[in-house]
Amino acid sequence: MKCFKIRVLPFILIFILLNGFGLFAQDLSKVDSLQYLIETSKNDSIKVYLNVAISREYAKKEVLVSLEYGEKALEIAS
């Protein structure tokens, strides 16, 4: 039983790491798309919504970046 755990553990760790990085790459792709929409949008309401969406994407990974986008949304809304 102990031998089985030693052989399976590396595969489980690799699986978890690869899945985690894949999700982060997808999130960055989504952020890139949202940033492009901000750049091309002329409507301030849409820019606020998009900045909030980007802020939510970063909320669990990079809190300071999330706060920056939240502040941008507040600035545009004011």
Image (cartoon, helix red, strand yellow):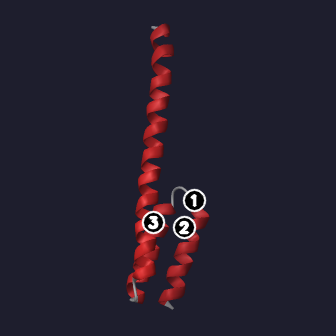
Quickly name the residue at label 3. 32
Describe the element under mark 1 as helix, strand or loop: loop
Question: Relative to the observer, which residue lies in front, 36 or 14?
Answer: 36
Q: Position of residue 73 (x, y in %)?
A: 50, 81
Question: Relative to the observer, which residue lies in front, 23 or 5?
Answer: 23
Q: Is residue 21 above or below residue 73?
A: above
Q: Is residue 4 above or below residue 60?
A: above
Local crowd at mark 2 within 10 Å, few (<14), some, or many (≥20)? many
Local crowd at mark 1 within 10 Å, few (<14), some, or many (≥20)? few
Q: Amino acid at mark 1?
A: Glu
Q: Position of residue 51 (x, y in %)?
A: 46, 75
| Residue at x 43% of width, y 57% of height | 27
Quickly name the residue at label 2. 66
Q: Position of residue 12 (x, y in %)?
A: 45, 27
Q: Amino acid at mark 2?
A: Ser
Task: Report the mark closest to the observer, 3 or 1.
Answer: 3
Identify the image quadrant of residue 49: bottom left
> Quarter holding the N terminus?
top left
The numbered mark, 3 or 1, whose residue comes first in the sequence reads: 3
Cβ atoms at labels 1 and 2 below 8 Å apart = yes
Describe the element under mark 3 as helix, strand or loop: helix
Describe the element under mark 2 as helix, strand or loop: helix
The numbered mark, 2 or 3, whose residue comes first in the sequence reads: 3
Q: Is residue 77 above or below residue 7?
A: below
Alpha-carbon span between mark 1 and mark 2? 6 Å
Question: Relative to the observer, which residue lies in front, 37 or 27?
Answer: 37
Quickly name the residue at label 1. 62
Question: Relative to the observer, which residue lies in front, 40 or 48?
Answer: 40
| Residue at x 58% of width, y 66% of height | 65
| Residue at x 42% of width, y 59% of height | 29
